[in-house]
Image: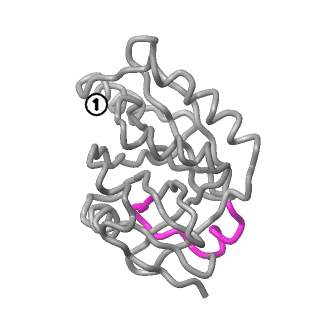
């Protein structure tokens, strides 16, 4: 983990209070620079021997032109793949993705209330940024009503492809949670 990160305390509290497994998108400050992050809280802890090997991040747009969702997948090497479906109609989620693309830098976090927080940094992985940018370009036309989103999650949950655990996405439109300094939570690296 970098020397220090500043997150929005209310967003992390919401993540901790949500039923697991879950996934969220938020903003953080690292060295005074604002960027986005993806955070997951799995139902069962991921052992350090697994997280130490890293993971592969994938994303795709699913659905038809009228109802689309963004699939975010995290495949931990030699272990489980986790999926989260993000509704492109959510303006807070779009703001996080836009910041990730603008900064060409983003973080991934695995939050285990018992074992703590594991932090990964993208380190400018251009291949993921190109794909994410391409998917983001479809967002202005991608819409998904709450009912359609629920239906698509239910369908995907029955047969995730590739196989894996489907995380519940924290669908919040509260853009105040993107203002890290509104309710800062300072994390010190080791």
Residue 110 in picture, x, y percent from top left: 50, 65
Nearest the camera: 97 or 40? Answer: 97
Q: How many marks?
A: 1
Nearest the camera: 121 or 151? Answer: 121
Q: Is residue 63 left or right of residue 17?
A: right
Using the rendered view, name the quadrant where residue 136 is placed.
top right
Residue 184 in picture, x, y percent from top left: 36, 73
Q: Is residue 96 left or right of residue 126?
A: left
Residue 166 lies, with reference to residue 1, above or below; the image says above
Q: Quadrant of the C terminus?
A: bottom right
Q: Residue beneath label 1, please? A: 150
Nearest the camera: 156 or 32? Answer: 32
Q: Is residue 51 magenta?
A: yes
Instruction: Please report the bounds of the magenta region as a residue range.
Output: 40-54
Using the rendered view, name the quadrant where residue 133 is placed.
top right
Residue 145 lies, with reference to residue 40, above or below; the image says above
Residue at screen point 48% across, 32% down: 70
Residue 82 in picture, x, y percent from top left: 51, 49
Q: Residues within 10 Å of mark 1 (few under 14, many from 20)?
A: some
Residue at screen point 31% across, 49% down: 175
Q: Quadrant of the N terminus?
A: bottom right
Prevalent SS, magenta region: loop
Residue at screen point 64% across, 27% down: 134
The scheme the figure's colours follow is: one colour
Q: Is residue 17 magenta?
A: no
Residue at screen point 42% across, 68% down: 7
Residue farthest to the bottom?
190
Nearest the camera: 5 or 165? Answer: 5
């Amino acid at each position: 983990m970098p020397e220090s990160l500043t997150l929005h305390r209310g967003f992390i509290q919401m993540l901790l209070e949500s039923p697991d497994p879950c996934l969220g998108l938020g903003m953080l400050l690292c060295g005074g620079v604002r960027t986005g992050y993806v955070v997951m809280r799995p139902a069962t802890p991921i052992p350090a021997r697994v997280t130490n090997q890293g993971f592969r991040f994938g994303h795709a747009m699913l659905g038809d032109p009228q109802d689309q969702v963004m699939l975010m997948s995290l495949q931990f090497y030699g272990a489980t793949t986790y999926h989260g479906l993000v509704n492109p109609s959510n303006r807070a989620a779009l703001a996080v993705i836009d910041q990730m693309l603008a900064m060409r830098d983003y973080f991934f976090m695995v939050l285990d209330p018992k074992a703590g927080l594991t932090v990964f940094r993208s380190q400018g992985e251009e291949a993921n940024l190109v794909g994410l940018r391409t998917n983001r370009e479809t967002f202005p036309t991608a819409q998904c009503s709450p009912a359609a989103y629920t239906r698509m999650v239910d369908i995907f949950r029955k047969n995730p492809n590739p196989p894996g655990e489907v995380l519940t996405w924290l669908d919040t439109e509260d853009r105040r949670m993107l203002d890290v300094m509104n309710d800062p939570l300072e994390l010190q690296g080791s």
